Image (cartoon, rainbow, N blue to C red):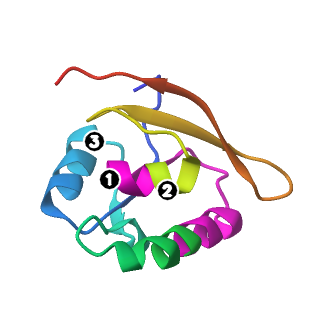
Amino acid sequence: MNRIGKAVVYSSQSCRCLDTARLLDLGEISELPPLNLFFENFDQEKIRTEQTMQWLQNAPLDTPTVLVSHQVNISALTEYSPASGEIVFLRRTNDGSISVTGSIQTLN
């Protein structure tokens, strides 16, 4: 994965995301509940998006960091709608905001 041999990996608690995180084989996986799917509970969208943003603003990010989540969560956070399995790259600026810097389509 872009010559990253090791990363800090955080995942939604869903089996599918945890399986994806394991398959990346980049390091130990930590569950991060704000990454959990809110598709069937849209009342959770705002709170989970805010929690994820707060986490991103406070995370050290001095090591490559991978978050494994769901399309609706990524779209709510970034205003970018990824395809299934697409890898989205973000950059955190000095003021704590994030921006999409690129993406990689994967084979489905």
Q: From the image, tell me which residue sits under label 3.
A: 25
Q: Residue at x 41, y 57 (%)?
A: 73
**Rounded to the nearest whole Å, what is the CA distance between mark 3 and mark 2?**
27 Å
Q: Which residue position is annotated with label 1?
A: 70
- The kind of residue tagged 2 is Ala
Amino acid type at image mark 3 = Asp
The residue range painted magenta reads 51-74
- Quick one: label 1 or label 2, which is nearer the N terminus? 1
Label 2 secondary element: helix
Q: Position of residue 78 (x, y in %)?
A: 56, 48
1 or 2: mark nearer the eye: 2
The residue carrying pointer 1 sits among few (fewer than 14), some (14 to 19) or many (20 or more) residues within 10 Å by Cα, namely many
Quadrant, the N terminus: top left
* Label drawn at residue 76: 2
N-terminal of the two: label 3 or label 2?
A: 3
Earlier along the polypeptide chain: callout 1 or callout 3? 3
Looking at the image, residue 94 sits to the left or right of residue 14; the answer is right
Q: Which mark is residue 58?
A: none
Q: Are marks 3 and 2 in contact (CB under 8 Å)?
A: no
Q: Where residue 62 sits in the image (x, y, percent)?
A: 67, 51
Please report the residue visible at 55 percent of the width from the left and 46 percent of the height from the top: 79
Q: Nearer the viewer, residue 92 or 22?
A: 92
Residue 60: tell me if it is visible: yes
Q: Residue at x 22, y 49 (%)?
A: 22
